[in-house]
Each structure stands twice: as C-alpha cells, then as structure tokens.
Amino acid sequence: MIPASLPSSVLADFFDAFRLARSGVQYRRFEERLHRLLSFSLSLILRTPGGVSRLNMRPLQRAYTPRDGVEARRLLALETHSQLSLLPSDVKRYGILLDPVFHEYLRNNPVALPLALMRRFHNRPLYWDAASYLLYRCWSSRAPCVIPWKIVRRQLASVDQLDRRLALSLNRVADEIRADYPDFPVRVKPGSHDLVVAPFRPPREHFRV
C-alpha cells in the first residue's frame, strides 16, 4: 500500500540516515525505487551437505508509508504475519513487510552492512555490490584464505566483465572500506587476481537498528 504521493515527513528518518537532501527529485527517486523493489523476485539455489534446494522469493511483500500514527496502527492491526516489519517502536513512520522465506534466510545467513558503508556506496550500485561481496567473504571466513579468481569472476560478473578492471574496482572498494575500518583484511593479488580475505566483522556499535 503506497500513497499516490509521499509526504516529506514520512521519509525524514531515511533521508537523515543517508544524509540526503530533502528535495522533490530525491522523493520521486525513492518512490520509483520502492516500486521496482516491490516487483523484484529472487531465486536461490542452495547446495548443502543435505542436498540441493531452491528458494523462490519476492523479498518485499508490501511497503506502506502511513501519513500519521493513526493510519500506521490501523495497518498494523490488519497484519497476521509473525515476522519482521521494519518499523520504529512508536509505530508512526513507515515500514516494509518481508517475504517469510526471505526473512528466514536473512536470519539464518546474516551479513551486516554498517550504515557508514551504506552511506558511502548508496549512490554507486556496482561498488555497493562489490562491498557487500567483500564483507560477506570476510564475515563467512574462519581463517585467512585465498579465493581463486575464477570463483570471484563467476560471482561478480555483473560488476565488470573485464578482469583487470574488476580487480582494480575490488581493490578500490577495499581501500574505501579501510577509510572507515583500517584493518579490513582484503586485497586482490597482482597477476593472478586471486582474492585474499580473512575473518572480519565491523564492531557491533557501528550498526543502526
């Protein structure tokens, strides 16, 4: 449920978090992106020791931008899903309802992206993809390791098709992450382009709920 027009007060928290100017252009851009996300579908193939399974999900089931607390409470009173609804505790702003399968997948496979890095890459989607991938690799790593370039290439084909340029982009993203986290342990090896990673998780206090 999305109103035909989005009142500026509804998105104040979001715009403040990402330090965006509260302009008509930014509000329209937010609304257009939200509509695209609501139509987005996702398929995951999971290969585990127990076998192969496929998950088909529509990550965002619904989004709503209530104009005031009365409307928000009315909407929530109609909800019967026992899963995540991203709303402040005073229930007077806005929220999204996640696909139950997608929500369970996120809870079982968490990789947190700090707000500082979301601000840094929010307007550069390819670098955002690369940053998410590097953080995932560090998050899931239990010891220092080397990831062969052919695996990196297969998993990041959408970022860049040229090996040299992709390697350069990954090193640049890692350097930018080190601007906030100097000990971020990622680099691309010269020549082979293999990715060197080690366990790393940003401090808990750097996350905003």
Image: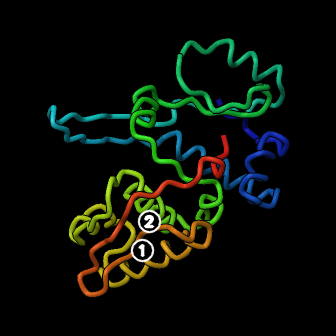
> Which element carries disc 2, helix, strand or loop?
helix
Figure label count: 2
Occupied quadrant, residue 43: top left
- Toward the viewer: 115 or 94? 115
* Rendered residue at 42%/52% (across/down): 139
How far apart are the two marked residues, 1 and 2, measured between alpha carbons?
Answer: 7 Å
- Toward the viewer: 184 or 115? 184
**Residue 191, how many percent across, how many down?**
26, 87
The amino acid type found where label 1 is placed reads Leu
The amino acid type found where label 2 is placed reads Ala
**Residue 6, how many percent across, how many down?**
77, 42
- State if disc 2 and disc 1 touch (CB < 8 Å): yes
Going by the image, does 176 lie left or right of 78? Answer: left
Q: Residue furthest bottom?
A: 191
The residue where tag 2 is placed is 130
> Which element carries disc 1, helix, strand or loop?
helix
* Rendered residue at 83%/45% (across/down): 8
The residue where tag 1 is placed is 170
Going by the image, does 79 lie left or right of 67? Answer: left
* Nearest to N terminus: mark 1 or mark 2: 2
**Residue 192, how many percent across, how many down?**
23, 82
* Rendered residue at 15%/37% (across/down): 49
